[in-house]
Image: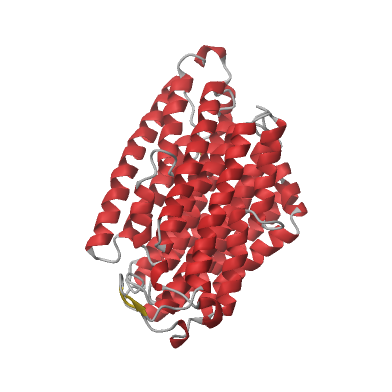
Amino acid sequence: MLVLSPLLVPLITALLTALLARHAAMQTRVSVLGAATQLIFAAMLLIDVLQGGRQSVALGNWPLPYAIEFAADALSAAMVLIAALLGFATVLFGRHWNETGMGMPGLQPLLHGLLAATAAVFLAADLFNLYVWFELMLISVLGLLVLGGKRRHGDAAFKYFAVSMLGTLLMLGAVGMIYGATGHLNFSALRAASIQPGLAGALPAYIGLLLLAVLLKAGAFPLFAWLPASYHTLPAPLLALVGGLLTKVAAYVLLRLLADVFVATPGVLIEALGWLALATMLSGVLGAAYHWDLRRILAFHIVSQIGYLLFGIALATPAGAAGTVFFLLHNILVKAALFLIAGLMWASAGHYDLRRIGGLYLARPLLAVLFLVSAFSLVGVPPTTGFWGKFLLLREAFDQGRYVWGGVALAVGLLTLYSMSKIWVEGFWKPHPMQQPDHGPAQLRPAATALPATAYTAVMLLSLVILIMGIFPDPFIRYVDAATARFWTGALR
């Protein structure tokens, strides 16, 4: 049952926090305890996988491949652990956080429901099970979007809902057609069925439809407009959790399906995915360069970084998969840390608009250092996690002769440097404006308010992991190499 523990713990926590809706202090303590417990069980599961190999449990009183299977291998166990770490950090950050929507009694149940669904997606070993938990994850996000109760929250939720429903219908249709063609939903059975010559005609079209649904949920070009139009309405802790996890879960699903399940996917789909990755990178980073709102800048960078992940998947080799997984782990941590830092900047200066912020370098030197750690990593400055992730991807791309793909990835890194420099110069380096004729009166100087210690602790926790992965990358690179050694080979477990 250890395989199910990262799923069951947040489900129980969600139930308990719902029952404690009228007792805010107790609800918060139970939430923190539940997040810490999930982190502990996720670490135990990873250790169990390292010692005993792939672990699985079959539910429904049916034999495999017909039972509902949850499985943990080296990749899924690592993803469960990183998601649990992010969940704990965001719950800790939000413990004393005062922003619109944070005081709502439904927040904690929805948050832990999201953590449960995310863990279940990582552990799902059959296609319909994955679909169900993916949709429960998106329903939890929809609930979080409307918590603020204002018109902008309703608008954001509607945009998110409309796109999600389209993706849901496409995914469900694709799952049904794949089942009709193969007679299976279990990943191992689908892997064996997908290489049968008799399915070579119809199955690629169904796989293409499934990929389209997941790409829509991942925020790939040109289907990403919903993301910056909805994410920015969330308070900082929820934005870090949703922005750090949601699209990366979709990228994980793409990698798992293409590299481990449907290994006979036609090369034309993989090639198209590579060029789509370049368009996603460029559109995201250009959107980030255009905007001045911290949340929108970072939301567009989610799109850009999804492009890197699609780029790694499209390399279609074990080495490319290893680079993709390392970049995936890096990006979850860095993106969440940057959203939390943006929240601390808002709490210091009263704005998310960079034109109304300034002087944070002198007023909040620790915050400035924490920002530089994550910003350098997002850009890919050595020896950060971003550098190693991009190095692994670019090395494989150039080894394959994909010079255009690699060149675009390098250019996007330079544009990322521009937008991170804009945040540094406008938010930290320039003097804090006492008066802004074009944008109304400035808020109080940053030093006028105190920031919650738990918020700083959460950011420092993520920053510490980022530093360790960047300074000592070898164990992590060896781990992702081993976790993806079978990918794209068609080898059975």
Any part of residue 209 in sight: yes
Q: Is residue 99 above or below residue 158?
A: below
Q: Residue furthest left?
A: 151
Any part of residue 312 in sight: no
Q: Is residue 438 above or below residue 161?
A: below
- x%, y% of residue 414? 58, 50
- Give me the residue at 74% from left, 60% from top: 471
The residue lying toward the viewer, choosing from 103 and 337, is 337
Coloration of the structure image: secondary structure
The residue lying toward the viewer, choosing from 101 and 413, is 413
- Give me the residue at 61% from left, 70% from top: 461
In the shown orientation, is residue 258 left or right of residue 326?
left
In the shown orientation, is residue 104 left or right of residue 10?
left
- x%, y% of residue 126? 51, 37
The residue lying toward the viewer, choosing from 400 and 361, is 361
- x%, y% of residue 474? 77, 52
Q: Residue furthest front?
A: 437
- x%, y% of residue 43? 64, 60
In the shown orientation, is residue 466 left or right of residue 197?
right
* Residue 106 location, quadrant: bottom left
- Give me the residue at 36% from left, 30% from top: 173
Image quadrant containing the C terminus: top right
Q: Is residue 233 above or below residue 394?
A: below
* Residue 82 location, quadrant: bottom right
Q: How many marks?
A: 0
- Give me the residue at 65% from left, 46% from top: 390
